[in-house]
Image (cartoon, helix red, strand yellow):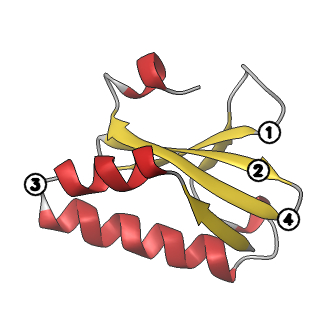
Amino acid sequence: MKAEFRRSFTRDLEKLNDRSIRERVSEVIDAVKAANNLDEVTGVKKLQASANLFRIRVGEFRIGIRAIGEDVVFVRCLHRKDIYRHFP
């Protein structure tokens, strides 16, 4: 799949202090790029808000993504207490 990154996602990653979380996020990004569709990626759950919004759990952090056809847009990467305030 083709992956795009919003500026908000990159800013969220820069703010992460935990190196292990950054490495796990990097592994998730690689898994999404290697997959043919989101069903092949472990830990992906569809949000009820919209037909094309998903989240991926990484420890206590959540990655908010938007699926547009064969493309995936990484929108946010925030702590689980904050993600649903800022995404979608």
Q: Is residue 64 above or below residue 27?
A: above
Q: Which residue is mark 4?
A: 70
Which residue: 45% across, 23% down?
86
Instruction: Please give the label number shown on residue 17.
Output: 3
Measure the C-alpha gap from mark 4 to mark 2. Answer: 7 Å
Q: Are marks 1 and 3 in contact (CB under 8 Å)?
A: no
- Give the residue type that dot 1 points to: Asn
Q: Quadrant of the N terminus?
A: bottom right
Q: Which residue is mark 1?
A: 52
Measure the C-alpha gap from mark 3 to mark 4. Answer: 32 Å
10 Å crowding of disc 1: few (<14), some (14-19), many (20+): some
Measure the C-alpha gap from mark 1 to mark 2. Answer: 5 Å
Q: Is residue 70 above or below residue 58?
A: below
Q: x%, y% of residue 73?
A: 64, 54
Q: Are marks 1 and 2 in contact (CB under 8 Å)?
A: yes
Q: Which residue is mark 2?
A: 67
Q: Residue furthest right?
A: 69
Element class at badge 4: loop
Q: Are marks 4 and 1 in contact (CB under 8 Å)?
A: no
Element class at badge 3: loop
Q: Quadrant of the C terminus?
A: top right
Q: Are marks 3 and 4 in contact (CB under 8 Å)?
A: no
Q: Are marks 4 and 2 in contact (CB under 8 Å)?
A: no
Element class at badge 2: strand
10 Å crowding of disc 2: few (<14), some (14-19), many (20+): some
10 Å crowding of disc 4: few (<14), some (14-19), many (20+): few
Between discs 3 and 4, the one toward the N terminus: 3
Measure the C-alpha gap from mark 1 to mark 3. Answer: 30 Å
Question: Can you tell which quarter of the image residue 31 is in?
Answer: bottom right
Q: Is residue 64 left or right of residue 27?
A: right
Measure the C-alpha gap from mark 3 to mark 2. Answer: 28 Å
Element class at badge 1: loop
